[in-house]
Image (tube, rainbow, N blue to C red):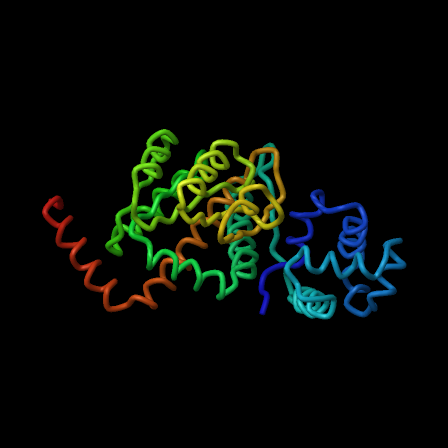
Amino acid sequence: MHTGSVTSRIEGILTSLPQSERKIGTTILAEPEWVVRASIQALAEKADTSGAAVIRFCRSLNFSGFPELKRQLSVELSKPQRTGYFDIEPDDSFSSIKEKLVSNMVQTANDTAGLLEEPALREACRLLGEAESIYVYGVGASWPVAEDVAQKWMRSGKPVLASQDTHVLAMAFAASKKKGVFIAISNSGETSSVLEIAQQAKENGVTVISLTRFGNNKLKSLADLALETSRAPEAELRSAATSSRHAQLLTIDILYYYYATLHYDTMIQQIQKSREATNRFRI
């Protein structure tokens, strides 16, 4: 069952869609109330495209078909107030900034939760559970997320290497004879250094898990397993980068706690050991 905002999902991916699907998305955004009562053929005619294009559009949004899209859109429209993504503007008040950022966080959380499917997370947990080594990489706003991954899975008892130096990671891939998993983090999925080091991981037999925004991108295509977050519209002051970081951190939190439930007894022991190991450094 999908949660989150259908319209936000459409807004985020609209410009990257083929023209026929873009016309459908534009029509839905312009008249969402009409769409929930329309047939596939009626929507296709209104958007000046085909029924097949409507079906492809639904699949592009990760819906099984038009009925599911209409159901979720109907639920969204029935809510008394819809949150959304807002950018910071000149002379915004302190109160306005707070309200906008909170709205962005709420929308990001709902939209990202709607994209996370249990089979994908269960498979990620399996791969991480079987891994003898875990590697993590991200640049810019994705680097703190990579550090969070490292800290969490080290606490679970896994050897983790998180480095901003691609040479170090490349050498680690080449030297490792163990079963490894590489978590590659890039909001766009097009960051050249992330793509390059992900390719290095693949060539050395390391399984790649990608964490990118929703939609098609090179990193997702390269990965053995793809996890996706909400796709906030780009903004002048890059509030979208703030939203992407929140989305990535939420995804990692959900993955970690799901992993913990599947390895509960072992996790409790490992967390206790890590706590004892760090207690000596506390004042």
Residue 138, x across and y down, in percent: 43, 38
Residue 93 found in image quarter:
top right
Residue 153, x across and y down, in percent: 30, 52
Q: Is residue 19 left or right of residue 158?
A: right
Q: Quadrant of the N terminus?
A: bottom right
Residue for point 34% across, 42% down: 147
Residue for point 81% across, 70% down: 37
Residue 160, x across and y down, in percent: 29, 46
Residue for point 56% across, 51% down: 230
Q: Is residue 258 left or right of residue 280?
A: right
> How many numbered discs, if any?
0
Q: Is residue 81 left or right of residue 169?
A: right
Q: Quadrant of the C terminus?
A: top left
Q: Is residue 273 left or right of residue 214?
A: left
Residue 227, x across and y down, in percent: 50, 53
Residue for point 71% across, 66% down: 65
